[in-house]
Image (cartoon, rainbow, N blue to C red):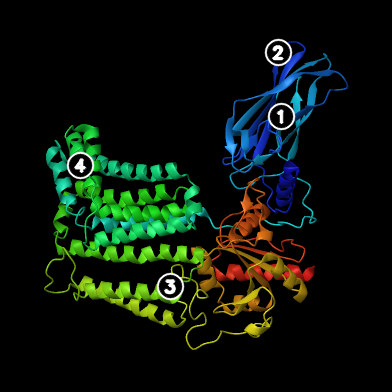
């Protein structure tokens, strides 16, 4: 029964997709054994990320691969079973059983015996393929084996003919932003962080020392340049290996799932506070001296190995400065999952390594470098303030998930105003910290940076009274998570045709501040109200700790043409997938994704709804649907372009009117 339910779910999901996915292609060939015996060979070419299931799958599992062959009117005899390759056997997390599957390619062989007048054999293969987040329905493909020429014919997965609109589930593909864009942003931020680390007291003085060592110890200038380049590459390898280790130990996707975990956020809040206090001069985080001594001894060996250990020595010795930055980068990158930690370490190490190679190639540039001094400690302190501010982002996410309301928007902004205000006073020389050099005057650069920080501090102040603060919308809690959701002195912004005041709200609804959008947090209640008022439903799969959700709500939704639609032309149903409040006893049900486990929290219920129905697990995720649950237009994810989001809304509403 479980198998029937799962297959039905996957089938209905796939039927509605406007995008026809064909991740498997089949090719056939024939191997002649004797005058009347042949091996029919079926080769499957599988796209990266997808896997094809074996012929032998346990009961209640996915649909196995199955072959049938035409007997040619009694002239073809199938000998034995179809043989298959070794494949991979894993404990499947969805089906909760050991399952064998194939990646990239699979070969199946079937031995047959024929009469002499048979020139071709027809057959079919039925199979099911899945990737890490979705499965396609069972697909049947015709196969043809040419015995006469022992040739090969190719058959590709044919599109299903079940593309009608009878399915009440998903009727469109998801338009998600390219992950490459996210990785490029991680790389760019990490690259800038590497340059910031370069300007710390532990790293900057090493540039002239190291470059001079290579140029003096090398037989000629070319050799010095070569050794310095190898040194830089070694630095990159060391940090990339660190990022690879983080990804390998925790898994490419497991860290992404931790992003909304309460303890994950609290632990990293404490970790970043420790990093910040270290940068501010309270103490230094250092690796054991014996590590550095052992590495130094290896560096004396010379050659490529010696140069590599010199790079490792730099990483260890400079850890007190680079460690907090690397740790923060890994925290941010790890929360995004995938290859982000590796890409982050690549960008960071490239910024560290680049100056060594450049100054080795052009040693004359060393004369233009500023001298080491108190300004290096200033850089370190500024980074400490930034680490401290970032730490409260993680604490805020934990507070949002738990809904404790201890760190509401006003409190968060007050903390940031205090942090950046104190940083401005420090840059103006009004505050001194340990390890600071006596400040006789303020340089123009320091004054300029101080003015920027002071301006930013003043910019945040109106946020205490309800200003949206679009420049930092991804960091503080949303405006409705506030002591004064509509701003001090204001009751609400605008009005809605559906509810003119808080007393007239339908059951289960609330007004989403500060835009006064009527919203539901329950699927059934929102759908029932939409039927009552004759308007389409906009499902908003969101999360309390979802940064891009806040950007959409504060930067895109307030646009007048979009706000009008959200207030008056659709019924908004916001489903928080990280809501940790417990379900009522009567609402606790067994998970369809993990049979045997119960859904205990509200967020689990909405997360499973999104995963099963739309085969997506990222937020934000927007769906426009009619009263029968059928999608009016392809769902979309994070769409920062307000024109694109508005066009999507308009098209979906027009489709609803045509029904």
Residue 339 is situated, as x and y percent measured from the top left of the image, at 45, 47
- Please indicate, yes or no, whether residue 219 appears anywhere in the rendered image: yes
Tag 4 residue? 292
Single out the mark in the foreground, 4 or 1: 4
Sooner in the amino-acid sequence: mark 4 or mark 2: 2
Q: Are marks 1 and 3 in contact (CB under 8 Å)?
A: no
Q: Is residue 612 left or right of residue 200?
A: right
At mark 4, the secondary structure is helix
Tag 1 residue? 153
Sooner in the amino-acid sequence: mark 1 or mark 3: 1
At mark 3, the secondary structure is helix
Q: Where, by quadrant of the figure, is residue 55 drawn?
A: top right
Sooner in the amino-acid sequence: mark 4 or mark 1: 1
Q: Name the residue nearer the viewer: 407 or 512.
A: 407
Tag 2 residue? 33
Sooner in the amino-acid sequence: mark 3 or mark 4: 4
Q: Residue furthest right?
A: 73
At mark 1, the secondary structure is loop
Q: Name the residue nearer the viewer: 247 or 192.
A: 247
- Neighbours of disc 3 within 10 Å: few (<14), some (14-19), many (20+): few
Single out the mark in the foreground, 2 or 1: 2
Q: Which mark is residue 471?
A: 3
The quarter of the image holding the C terminus is: bottom right
User: Marks 1 and 3, Cα distance to the nearest angstrom?
Assistant: 59 Å
């Amino acid at each position: 029964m479980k198998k029937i339910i799962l297959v039905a779910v996957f089938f209905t999901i796939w039927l509605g997709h406007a995008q026809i996915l064909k991740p498997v292609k089949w090719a056939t060939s024939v191997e002649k054994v004797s005058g009347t015996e042949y091996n029919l060979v079926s080769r499957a070419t599988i796209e990266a990320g997808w896997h094809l299931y074996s012929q032998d799958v346990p009961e209640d599992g996915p649909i196995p691969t199955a072959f049938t062959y035409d007997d040619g009117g009694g002239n073809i005899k199938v000998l034995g079973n179809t043989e298959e390759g070794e494949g991979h056997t894993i404990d499947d997390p969805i089906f909760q059983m050991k399952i064998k599957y194939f990646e990239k390619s699979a070969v199946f062989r079937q031995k047959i015996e024929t009469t002499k007048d048979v020139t071709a054999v027809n057959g079919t293969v039925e199979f099911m393929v899945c990737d890490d987040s979705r499965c396609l329905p069972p697909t049947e493909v015709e196969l043809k084996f040419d015995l006469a020429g022992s040739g090969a014919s190719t058959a590709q997965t044919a599109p299903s003919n079940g593309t009608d609109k009878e399915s009440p589930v998903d009727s469109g593909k998801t338009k998600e932003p390219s992950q490459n864009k996210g990785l490029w942003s991680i790389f760019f931020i990490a690259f800038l962080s590497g340059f910031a680390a370069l300007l710390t007291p532990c790293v900057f003085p090493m540039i002239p020392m190291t470059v001079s060592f290579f140029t003096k110890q090398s037989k000629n200038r070319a050799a010095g340049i070569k050794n310095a380049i190898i040194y830089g590459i070694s630095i990159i390898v060391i940090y990339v290996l660190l990022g690879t280790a983080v990804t390998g130990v925790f898994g490419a996707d497991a860290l992404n799932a931790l992003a909304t975990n309460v303890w994950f956020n609290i632990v990293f809040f404490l970790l970043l506070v420790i990093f910040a206090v270290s940068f501010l001069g309270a103490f230094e985080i250092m690796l054991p001296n014996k590590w550095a001594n052992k590495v130094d001894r290896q560096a004396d060996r010379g050659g490529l190995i010696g140069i590599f250990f010199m790079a490792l020595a730099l990483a260890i010795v400079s850890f007190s400065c680079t460690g907090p930055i690397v740790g923060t980068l890994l925290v941010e990158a790890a929360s995004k999952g995938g290859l982000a930690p590796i890409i982050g370490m690549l960008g960071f190490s490239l910024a560290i390594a680049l100056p060594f190679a450049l100054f080795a190639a052009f040693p004359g540039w060393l004369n233009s470098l500023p001298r080491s001094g108190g300004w290096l400690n200033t850089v370190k302190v500024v980074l400490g303030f930034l680490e401290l501010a970032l730490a409260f982002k993680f604490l805020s996410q934990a507070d949002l998930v738990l809904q404790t309301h201890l760190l509401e928007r006003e409190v968060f902004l007050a903390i940031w105003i205090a942090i950046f205000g104190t940083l401005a006073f420090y840059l103006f020389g009004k505050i001194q910290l340990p390890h600071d050099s006596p400040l006789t005057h303020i340089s123009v650069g320091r004054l300029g940076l101080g003015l920027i920080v002071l301006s930013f501090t003043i910019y945040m102040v109106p946020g205490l009274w309800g200003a949206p603060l679009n420049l930092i919308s991804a960091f503080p809690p949303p405006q409705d998570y506030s002591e004064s959701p509509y701003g001090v002195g204001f009751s609400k912004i605008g009005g809605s045709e559906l509810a003119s005041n808080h007393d007239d709200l339908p059951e289960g609804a609330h007004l989403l501040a500060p835009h006064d959008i009527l919203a539901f947090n329950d699927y059934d209640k929102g759908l029932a109200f939409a039927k009552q008022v004759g308007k389409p439903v906009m499902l908003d799969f969101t999360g309390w700790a979802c940064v891009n959700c806040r950007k959409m709500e504060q930067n895109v939704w307030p646009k007048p043409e979009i706000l009008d639609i959200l207030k008056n032309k659709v019924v908004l149903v916001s489903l928080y997938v990280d809501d940790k409040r417990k379900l009522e006893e009567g609402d606790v049900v067994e998970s369809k994704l993990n049979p045997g486990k119960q859904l205990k929290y509200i967020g689990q219920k909405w997360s499973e709804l999104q995963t099963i129905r739309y085969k997506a697990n990222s937020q934000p995720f927007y769906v426009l649907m009619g009263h029968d649950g059928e999608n009016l237009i392809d769902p979309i994810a994070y769409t920062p372009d307000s024109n694109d989001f508005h066009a999507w809304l308009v098209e979906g509403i027009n489709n609803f009117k045509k029904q």
